[in-house]
Each structure stands twice: as structure tokens, then as C-alpha cells.
Image: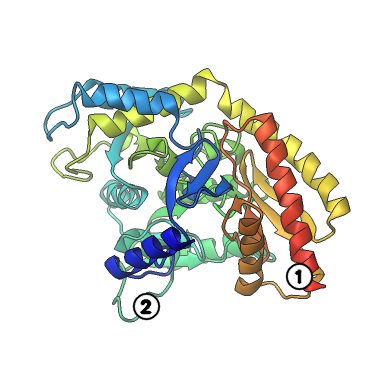
Amino acid sequence: MAMTDDLVSRDADAFFHQRGSSPCLSALRAAEGIWLEDIEGRRFIDLHGNTVHHIGHSHPEVIAALKRQLDTLAFSPRRFTNEPAVALAEKLLAHWPGARAKVLFATGGSDAIEIALKLARVATGRHETISLEGSYHGHGFGAFGLSKAAADPRLGPFLQGRRHVTPYWVQDGARRMLAEMREAFAQSPTGIAAVVAEPIRSNCHVPPDGLWAEVRELCDQHGTLLIFDEIPSGLGKTGRFFAFEHVGAMPDMVVLGKALGAGVLPIAAIIADARLDIAPELDLGHYTHEKNPLTSRAALTAIEIVERDGLVQRAAELEQRIRSRIAALAVKAPAIVGIRGRGLLLALEFDPAAFGMNPGPAFAARLVSSCFAAGLSTTSKGPDSIGFSLPMTVTDAELDLCFERLETAAATSQLEVA
């Protein structure tokens, strides 16, 4: 552990500390497929991957494509286009199930959310938004403000005009969410520019049937745009190419990110109704790497792999197999309650009472720690849940090994209580 401790210590000295990333848990020397390997040689199955590992880490075809791209065109200044960027735009639009659309690219999901907010303001002439309390849309002042009703006072105020409603995943949440949305529409003096939400929560909460269709109807009644944030959930992870295809509501815009760069390079995108292309005189998404050929090549190759290998269908199939196996495992490990989510965007739910604990951060940390000790890298997905998000490329043998380690983790946790 000396090498790990040394590198983690150097990292803590060099980087600003922040809650979610520094100081670090460990130090890696390799990431490939479903595997993470630390510098001591320990290997962990990655059940989290920051939701970038839809096709696994360091997919060899992506790495080879990037090497070829480096030898031809590595950067494209603004005002110039290039083949990978245009091909990626066309590829995304080919999957769009609605009316004619257009795209813009950015270097990360937060930036793409900011673009979507600007486009909604321009298109509607309004600035107010409705979003779900406790969601997450990024760390720009606009994006982070969508997630939190109040900023830390040291940060100062977020953008004005933000309205937050009860999320559907709490008790009686769907009814309260719709009632509070109606109230927000009625109270807004200028009108609401956009409703911004994840169609399926990244914590793997699936909305009740018909909920987003009602929100879509409300938006239409009030001339409001519906923006779906699929940064963690899009590109096939839920068993559909777009997560919103599960929920019966067509958005005006969708935001993609994370896995779009194949888990190798940072790129995000918005896809929006082409009728919103009404402000050519403005720079709504004018970034230095707006049409970077290298990041575009990573994304294009990733989508081609998803298409060729039938990975969207694979995610849908594996969901059903995993649900069956979790049900069987729960018989042997009663602490396991079940699993929620869609496709391979899943969270495993536990009973805190079986561990002699209450739901909350301490219990979630206990689950994560037990999994880590058993060779599973994951993160909490609420007060009593952990992520169970495997790449769509996971093999049957790898899935078997994952369940072996999960059973060990559950048994170890229960022994600790005894």
C-alpha cells in the first residue's frame, strides 16, 4: 500500500480539496473493460465508472480510432468544420425519434446544460425554470442552480428565476410534483422558459407511468420547453438509445454527455428541435473545442460500436437477467431488498435494519466499503442503495464473477454486524 498511500498523499497536497473527489480513495494504473486496477495490482469490477463506461474502459477500437485521428487532424479551429464532427452530428440526429433537429457540442455536460438554458431563454423570451429538488445537472452556476434551491452562502446567489418542485421518487412525490408544477406555472409573472429534468433519475429512480406525459402537456399549455438531461442515462444504457423513450414524452431538447466520449475524452451534446434555430447572431455554444475532431471521433466510434454490437438490446436483456439473479440472491442474503432502474442503469437496495443500522450516509458508506473490500467499486445511490451499473459490453462470465463478489460483500457486511 506504500505506493498508493504516497500517490494519494501527493494528490492531496497538489489539488484543491472537494467533497466528491479529493482527497482520493486510491490510485489507478489501468482501466480496461469492466476492470479498474490500482497501482498495487488489485483489481476491482467497476459498478460506477462515473457513468462514462457504457462500452467499457479503454475500448481497443476507440483507442485505435483516436490514434489514427491524431495522425490526420487533432484540432479544428472555430469557423472550420471537419468530417468526424459532421459525421457525429448526423449519427446522433439519425437516432432522434422526433421532428427535424439540430445539435451543438460542448466539452462537458455542465456546459451543455448551460447551452440548453440559453437556447430556452432565446426561444421563449423568458428566464424562469422548473427543476426537481435533489436532482443533479452539473456545476455551472446555471446547471448547479437547477439542482439546489439554495447555494452555500459563500458562493453567492445562483441564477434568478429558479423554481424547484418535489421529486417524483419521494413518498407521494408524483402527485406533489405535478401540483407544485401547476402552482409554479400559475405564479410565474413572466412565464416559465423550461422544465429541466432527468427522465430517469441517475440514482436509478424510474418515474410512474404517464408522469412525464402530463408534464409534457403542461409545457405545451404554457409555451414552455421540456429539456431532458440524459448525461448519465442516454446512449443505450437504459435499454433504449434515449432514456426518454421509456417515459412517453418527447422533449424539445435532450442533453448528452459522459459516455458520449467513450469514457476516454470529454464531449457533450444537445439535440434540439430545429425550429429553435432562431438566433444565428448569438454565440450560444461557441467553445474552443466546439467541433474537436478527436473528441468527435471518440463519440462517433462509441456509437458505431453500440449499434454494431447490439448493445442497446443487450442492456435491456441483461436487466431482466440481473433482476432474476438479484431475487435469487436475496433469498440467501435477506439484507438485499431488490433492484431498481432500467437496462444497466441500476441501483441495488438494502435493508439497513438487517445491518443494525438506519438508512443514511453512514449506512450507504458501509455498503460501499464492504463492496470495495470484495473487489467491487461502486458509489451510494441514496440512503440505502449502491450503484450496480455495469458496461453494456460485460460478458456472461464477468457477470457471474460480479455476483460472486456481491454475495461475498453482502455476507461480509452481515458478519460485521454479528
Percent across and percent down for residue 131 are 46, 60
State the image quarter where residue 352 is shown.
bottom right
The residue to which callout 2 is attached is 152
Q: Residue at x 44, y 54 (%)?
A: 195
Q: Please, which colouring scheme is shown?
A: rainbow
Percent across and percent down for residue 263 are 42, 39
Q: Residue at x 19, y 21 (%)?
A: 72
Percent across and percent down for residue 90 are 34, 23
- The amino acid marked with disc number 2 is Asp
- How far apart marks 2 and 1 lie (CA) works out to 37 Å
Q: Which disc is residue 250 wearing?
A: none
Q: Which disc is residue 416 wearing?
A: 1
93 left or right of 121 in image: right
How many numbered discs, if any? 2
- The amino acid marked with disc number 1 is Glu
Q: Secondary structure at mark 1?
A: helix
Q: Do labels 2 and 1 touch, CB within 8 Å? A: no
Question: 142 or 282: which is nearer to us?
Answer: 142
State the image quarter where residue 78 is shown.
top left
Q: Is residue 263 above or below residue 17?
A: above
396 left or right of 247 in image: right
Question: 413 or 171: which is nearer to us?
Answer: 413
Residue 303 visible: yes
State the image quarter where residue 321 is shown.
top right
Percent across and percent down for residue 256 are 41, 41
What residue occupies the far bottom of the structure in this picture? 153
